[in-house]
């Protein structure tokens, strides 16, 4: 039972790390990456629905300062442009009737500092989620000990394992955030 819980806990920590990686991928670093547009929702008039941009077009980065979107339905080009403009990223797309080009402007130092603050908030939210996982599994083990499913010694060992897992997860989260911060500042 203890090993099952610990295995499940490690999966939960992996989910926390994966979520932070996805969030960090949306932060622009001055280089164009298709992940920058992952969170952009497009209101498509023809379909009467809001959709993620990656369901409307393939996104590629042919060079460090340009994203190219190749829509599967050319009638959605104006909607895609409007969605990118309204995403609050400071991007100005243009199109030639076939593809949408999104030039990525260079970042100012002020904008880089703002992004570092945003990174810090994302990292802290991830650490809070990791501590939530720790709390959840500590409670599970304490309940198991209260109901005599495990001994007091097993409980102590399990709590140490939970703390070790939490420490490893938080260290990885901090490392990911630090690497992204360096990337943003160097641009």
Image: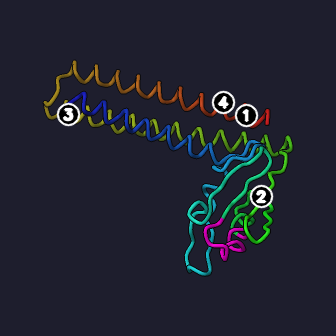
Residue shown at 42% from the left, 40% from the top: 132
**Residue 149 as seen in the image, left or right of residue 138:** left
Residue 87 lies, with reference to residue 133, above or below; the image says: below
Q: Are marks 4 and 2 in contact (CB under 8 Å)?
A: no
Marks 1 and 3, Cα distance to the nearest angstrom?
45 Å
Q: Residue at x 34, y 39 (%)?
A: 136
Q: CA distance from mark 3 to mark 4?
A: 39 Å
* Local SS, label 2: strand
Q: Reading the chain from its start, which is encountered first: label 2 or label 1?
A: 2
Percent position of residue 16, x then y: 47, 40
Q: Is residue 56 above or below residue 173?
A: below
**Which residue is found at the position 75% from the left and 65% from the top?**
85
Secondary structure under badge 1? helix
- Horizontally, is 98 left or right of 11 in the view? right
Tell me, yes or no, whether the two marked residues, 1 and 4, touch with CB atoms within 8 Å. yes
- The residue singled out by tag 1 in the image is 183
Q: Earlier in the sequence, mark 3 or mark 4?
A: 3
Instruction: Name the quarter where the C terminus is drawn.
Output: top right
Q: Nearer the viewer, mark 2 or mark 3?
A: 2
Q: Which residue has dot 2 on it?
A: 102
The residue to which callout 3 is attached is 144
What number is the disc on residue 179?
A: 4
Labels 2 and 3 touching (C-beta < 8 A)? no
What is the C-alpha distance between the residues marked 2 and 3?
Answer: 55 Å
Residues drawn in magenta: 71-82
């Amino acid at each position: 039972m203890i090993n099952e819980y610990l295995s499940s806990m490690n999966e939960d920590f992996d989910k926390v790390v994966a979520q932070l990686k996805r969030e960090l991928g949306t932060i622009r670093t001055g280089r164009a990456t298709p992940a920058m547009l992952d969170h952009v929702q497009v209101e498509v008039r023809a379909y009467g629905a809001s959709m993620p941009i990656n369901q409307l077009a393939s996104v590629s980065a042919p060079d460090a300062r340009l994203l190219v979107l190749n829509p599967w339905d050319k009638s959605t080009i104006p909607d895609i442009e409007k969605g990118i403009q309204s995403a609050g990223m400071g991007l100005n797309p243009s199109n030639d009737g076939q593809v949408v080009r999104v030039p990525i402007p260079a970042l100012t130092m002020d904008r880089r500092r703002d992004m570092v603050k945003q990174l810090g908030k994302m990292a802290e939210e991830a650490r809070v989620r990791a501590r939530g996982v720790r709390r959840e599994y500590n409670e599970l083990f304490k309940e198991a000990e209260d109901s005599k499913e495990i001994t007091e010694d097993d409980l102590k060992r399990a709590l140490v394992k939970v703390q070790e897992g939490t420490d490893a997860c938080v260290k990885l989260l901090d490392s990911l955030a630090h690497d992204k911060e360096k990337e943003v500042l160097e641009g």
